[in-house]
Amino acid sequence: MELDELRARLTHFAAAHYGPHQVVRQLGGFAGSHGGLTFGFEIWNEATETRTAALVIRLSPPGVRRAANTDVLRQVPLLQTLAAHGMVQYSFARGFWASTSIRYDSGLVSNPSDPAKVAADPDYFDLLPYVNLDSNIPRVRPRTIVDAAVGYEKRSNERTIWDVSVQLSNITNATALYNFQSIFVGTRLVQPRTGGVKLRFFF
């Protein structure tokens, strides 16, 4: 499947599952994928310029029977237990709207680093509380992130003239990790509490 076709399908998926203003970004394949084609991508709210979700999709290779390690559908129940995301958006009269979202992640598998070496590393020792390196399968510890936004959209004759939105990300200012020493993206921390304002004009 070409990336443009996959992007179009994922855009429909994003709109159906996360609501309006959702776009797909950072779509790309993972090297060394076994038993299927694996792509990572992010879903962003274009109206508020905030990331809604970071996801991975696995596809069976073209023309290959879905069996054994190419039967990607049998992996769905397991993957669905790893995260949950909910979003509520309400549109008021006269173009005002408000939304809030909450996302729970059980934690991605991390690089199997030696805890003692990490504790002695000045670049990583303070991240040890946020990753479990002693389990059979090392994982980033679970996290729950809450975001909220309010906005106004000025429309005329079924056309948007301008809009403005105010976004507050990570309301509880939770400290957490997305990844820890990942071979793909390294170590990524959840963004601390952040506020932003966006104003757009449409010509």
Image (cartoon, rainbow, N blue to C red):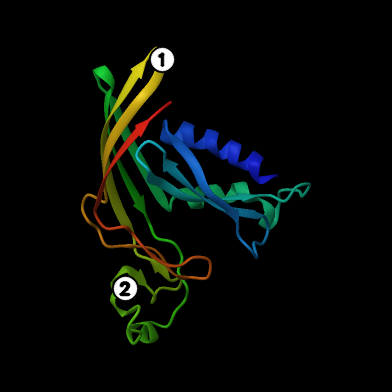
Is 15 above or below relative to 66? Answer: above
Helix, strand or loop at mark 1: loop
Q: Amino acid at mark 2?
A: Leu
Residue drawn at point x = 68 percent, y = 54 percent = 70
In the rendered image, residue 37, in percent from the top left (x then y), is placed at 66, 54
Is 107 above or below relative to 110? Answer: above
Residue drawn at point x = 27 percent, y = 62 percent = 175
Judged by depth in the image, the label closer to the viewer, 1 or 2, is 1
Helix, strand or loop at mark 2: helix
In the rendered image, residue 99, in percent from the top left (x then y), is placed at 28, 34
Quadrant of the drawing holding the C terminus = top left
Tell me, for residue 80, which label it has, or none.
Answer: none
* Residue most extreme to the left: 172
Q: Which residue is mark 1?
A: 158
Q: Which residue is mark 2?
A: 127
Q: CA distance from mark 1 to mark 2?
A: 50 Å
